[in-house]
Image: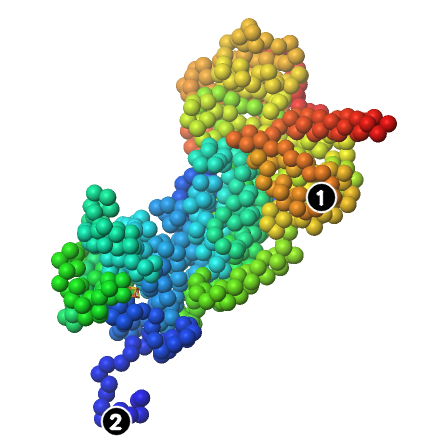
């Protein structure tokens, strides 16, 4: 062709560069699109391609193809192409844009795709102000699947799934997507255009270009709704269909800018550069130094199963965690397993802790060497499962008569009252921890102190907890007659 | 090596980030929330992306977008949420996009409860979404493995250009154990050449799962099948525990495998030579190893926190050469050492009685 143009003449209209010369991905008939004659998709794509060319962004563009008649956008666009699931283009476009902020991500959807199955995705992408450009082709019918009702189908219209005409009381009203999305704070620009005549098509071109420009400037979400003919399913010839867009659709769906915040919108800040990989362990709060206190000398085999139980809010889980943390510092294998979820919400809480010189198989403690029961229901529930020779620490003045056992050592002490005397009733769990250390010699106090210093972030609370720990130890010392034994040293 | 006492879920997320994960899209659900929360806290600090999606459906499609752009992306959920993601997982597999999906399994079906179960085995291993595809499935049993397998998951996902699932029960996610992070340094994976990144070089690239012509689609599905065949040959992983001389071989994964180690010990004290085969990959299933053990063991006992799902794969592997018994609990009940021991010894006694009865009958 070019050699037929005289040297002194320039073509005034050419195919957009970002459209392929021939549609090699299409296979058969690579010179023909897959759209029906007179279909609005062809025009819309042409406008989009021209806008991409004019803005010089072809190498940055990623077109996200939807499901529906326009599923094969990648046949035509010489840009990056990603084809996605029905309705999910705004979500996939979000993943693309957030991963590649420099890319110009264009999400293209029909009315079934965007306004029905994908209504949640478009609503939330718009509301987040996702910096993508959305082209919404509204022909008020399902084209690809053969003419079923769309959310945008006018009332009274007969479709294959509204054979007696769309009825509001049964099928709902046509959705005005541009108006709905304009009610949100997220979008910067929403305009409805039509393909009813040349004038409307030129306005559509300007709107599409503006929506793309917004993205180039780094502004947020833009959407252009294109009222578009579907001659095949409407059972009209192309001229009639165009007239229908011009004379009927625009009365149901008024054209114009629905929201425009481009003047006041600020470009989104560029994401900060990624830190060097060597920084990752620090940023991920991974310890780089050994805990200073470690188990010294030979220690017998340890296999200690501990159950801690009480009301939610008594610090049951923290108490268990501190035992596990200290056990780890002491060079033992440890596990900590909480009760979680609604159990927590119902007001009771318990955790299973195991300390062992060997690798821990099951982290569940069904039978325990040590039970710390911070309330009576917990004592009732778990006392029967304490192994003979075990130790029970109970938050109370004495063990209820019916729960007494001769084969376990029991310490009944009001841990929370003791803590209260220290001016911190909440530290009752730490008093219990001190009591455990003194009663069993399971772990040295300095190892527990070190674990507390690591886990308890506030200096004020660390000081309170340190006092509470000593009070717990003293309380046992003052009541104990026999030397401490370690209930779980084999 | 310094160790950190850490929840399984958090260990998994830290392992994933060290392993190159730079994007996480998720929706809250118990008992997977620590993962999502850790992603929200750590990813922005290391130059990654976190976004709480409007639904699991959106989350997996955001993963689809990020994976298309050549980013190591992941999501995490629990059974009901994974059901919603099934559509997206099928598309990811169809479009050959690598990504990691974590399922911290809870009780089902339906809303079920939030207690630990293993009843999403079928969903993870046999499909869950539509079409001919497979996910590679890893099953950690400790917080350390939550960390280590997260890293492996991204390697496998890239190697096979396929979604990889990590399935753990609620306990493995919620449990705290010491984790040693220093076996691995952080990696920054290169952008794969097939990705669509919005540059001149990647302009020609296309991500799609649609093949309209029957022959084209068949060729594509055959290519996927060949990939899965290779993975089956190369990627099966398992742990043997005292199986060398075992007459009775337990098969169990995740938290159950840990209970079963105690069971093995308890039975050996009674003079029963028990052992454990723990699948680490649920797909590819360690079928060859089970077949090998079937040459030596007298009986297999599969224990699951489900009404019997993996047991079907054990039976397929054993090929009818040995009895494969099943014991399962569900609803959030973890079978205890005592109940499994009791169940197995009763079964053995029953067999002895049956043998005596058979002898009597013949006499
Ligand atoms: S069915 Fe309608 S929308 Fe689809 S290609 Fe044909 S004219 Fe276009």
Question: Measuring 48% from the left and 36% from the top, which residue is drawn there?
Answer: B109
Q: What whole-number distance in Å separates the C-alpha atoms at marks 2 and 1? A: 83 Å
Within 10 Å of the Cα at label 2, are there few (<14), some (14-19), or many (20+) other Cα atoms?
Answer: few
Front-most of residues A474 and B197:
B197
Within 10 Å of the Cα at label 1, are there few (<14), some (14-19), or many (20+) other Cα atoms?
Answer: few
Q: Which structural element holds mark 2?
A: loop
Q: Which image quadrant shows ligand 1? A: bottom left
Asked whether mark 2 and ligand 1 are closer than 8 Å, the reply comes as no
In the picture of the structure, the residue carrying the numbered disc 2 is A7
The quarter of the picture where the N terminus of chain A appears is: bottom left
Give the vertical position of B259 relative to A115 (above or below).
above
Asked whether mark 1 and ligand 1 are closer than 8 Å, the reply comes as no
- Quarter of the figure with residue A232: bottom left
- Quarter of the figure with residue B261: top right
Question: Measuring 64% from the left and 9% from the top, which residue is drawn there?
Answer: A406
Visible residue check, residue A102: no
Give the vertical position of A17 relative to B276 (above or below).
below
With A337 as the anchor, is A67 left or right in this view? Answer: left
In the picture of the structure, the residue carrying the numbered disc 1 is B320
Specify the color scheme.
Answer: rainbow
């Amino acid at each position: 062709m070019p050699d037929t143009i005289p040297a002194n003449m320039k073509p005034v209209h050419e195919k957009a560069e970002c459209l392929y010369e021939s549609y090699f991905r299409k296979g058969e008939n690579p010179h023909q699109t897959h759209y029906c004659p007179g279909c609005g998709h062809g025009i819309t794509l042409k406008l989009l391609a021209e806008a991409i060319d004019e803005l010089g962004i072809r190498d940055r563009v990623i077109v996200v193809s939807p499901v529906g008649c326009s599923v094969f956008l990648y046949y035509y666009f010489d840009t990056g192409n990603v084809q996605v699931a029905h309705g999910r283009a705004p979500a996939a476009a979000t993943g693309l844009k957030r991963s590649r902020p420099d890319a110009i991500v264009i999400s293209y959807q029909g009315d079934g795709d965007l306004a029905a199955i994908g209504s949640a995705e478009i609503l939330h992408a718009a509301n987040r102000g996702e910096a993508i450009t959305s082209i919404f082709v509204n022909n008020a019918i399902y084209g690809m699947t053969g003419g079923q009702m769309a959310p945008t189908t006018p009332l009274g219209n007969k479709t294959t799934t509204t054979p007696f005409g769309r009825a509001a009381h049964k099928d709902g009203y046509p959705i005005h997507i541009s108006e709905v999305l304009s009610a949100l704070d997220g979008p910067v620009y929403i305009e409805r255009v039509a393909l009813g005549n040349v004038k409307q098509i030129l306005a559509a071109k300007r709107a599409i270009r503006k929506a793309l420009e917004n993205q180039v400037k780094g502004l947020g979400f833009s959407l252009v709704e294109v009222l578009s003919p579907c001659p095949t399913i409407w059972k009209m010839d192309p001229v009639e269909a165009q007239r229908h867009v011009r004379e009927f659709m625009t009365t149901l769906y008024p054209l114009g800018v629905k929201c425009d915040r481009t003047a006041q919108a600020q470009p989104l800040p560029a994401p900060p550069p990624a830190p060097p990989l060597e920084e990752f362990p620090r940023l991920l709060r991974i310890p780089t130094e050994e805990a200073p206190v470690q188990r010294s000398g030979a220690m017998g085999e340890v296999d200690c199963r501990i159950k801690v139980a009480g009301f939610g809010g008594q610090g049951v889980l923290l108490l268990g965690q501190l035992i596990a943390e200290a056990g780890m510092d002491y060079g033992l294998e440890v596990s900590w397993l909480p009760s979680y979820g609604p159990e927590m919400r119902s007001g009771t809480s318990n955790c299973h802790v195991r300390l062992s010189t060997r690798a821990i198989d099951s982290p569940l403690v069904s039978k325990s060497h040590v039970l710390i029961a911070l309330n009576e229901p917990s004592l009732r529930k778990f006392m029967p499962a304490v192994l003979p020779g075990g130790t029970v620490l109970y938050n109370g003045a004495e063990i209820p008569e019916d729960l007494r056992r001769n084969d376990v050592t029991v310490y009944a002490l009001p841990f929370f009252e003791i803590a209260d005397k220290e001016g911190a009733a909440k530290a009752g769990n730490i008093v219990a921890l001190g009591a455990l250390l003194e009663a069993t010699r399971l772990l040295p106090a300095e190892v527990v102190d070190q674990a507390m210093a690591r886990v308890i972030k506030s200096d004020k609370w660390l000081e309170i907890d340190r006092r509470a720990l000593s009070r717990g130890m003293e309380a046992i010392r003052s009541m104990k007659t026999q030397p401490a034994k370690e209930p779980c040293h084999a | 090596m310094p160790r950190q006492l850490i929840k399984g879920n958090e260990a998994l997320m830290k392992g994933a980030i060290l392993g190159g994960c730079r994007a996480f899209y998720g929706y809250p659900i118990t008992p997977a929330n620590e993962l999502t929360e850790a992603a929200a806290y750590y990813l922005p600090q290391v130059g990654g992306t976190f976004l709480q999606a409007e639904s699991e459906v959106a989350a997996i499609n955001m993963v689809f977008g990020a994976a298309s752009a050549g980013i190591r992306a992941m999501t995490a959920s629990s059974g009901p949420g994974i059901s919603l993601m099934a559509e997206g997982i099928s598309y990811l597999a169809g479009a050959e996009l690598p990504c990691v999906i974590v399922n911290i399994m809870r009780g089902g079906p339906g809303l079920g409860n939030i207690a630990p179960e293993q009843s999403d085995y079928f969903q993870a291993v046999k499909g869950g979404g539509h079409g001919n595809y497979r996910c590679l499935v890893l099953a950690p049993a400790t917080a350390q493995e939550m960390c280590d397998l997260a890293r492996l998951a991204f390697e496998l996902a890239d190697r096979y250009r396929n979604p990889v699932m990590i399935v753990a029960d609620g306990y493995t996610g919620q449990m705290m154990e010491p984790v040693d992070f220093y076996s691995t340094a952080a990696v920054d994976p290169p952008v794969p050449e097939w990705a669509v990144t919005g540059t001149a070089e990647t302009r020609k690239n296309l991500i799609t799962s649609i093949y309209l012509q029957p022959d084209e689609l068949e060729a594509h599905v055959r290519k996927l099948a060949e990939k899965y065949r290779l993975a089956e040959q190369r990627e099966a992983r398992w742990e043997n525990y005292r199986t060398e001389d075992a007459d009775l071989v337990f098969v169990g994964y995740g938290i159950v495998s840990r209970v079963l180690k105690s069971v093995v010990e308890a039975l050996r004290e009674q003079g029963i030579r028990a052992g454990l085969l723990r699948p680490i990959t649920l797909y590819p299933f360690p079928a060859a190893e089970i077949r090998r053990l079937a040459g030596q063991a007298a009986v297999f006992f599969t224990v699951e926190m489900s009404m019997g799902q993996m047991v079907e794969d054990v039976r397929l592997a054993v090929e009818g050469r040995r009895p494969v018994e099943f014991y399962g609990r569900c609803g959030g009940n973890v079978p205890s050492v005592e109940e499994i021991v009791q169940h197995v010894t009763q079964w053995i006694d029953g067999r002895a009685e049956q043998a005596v009865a058979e002898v009597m009958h013949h006499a």
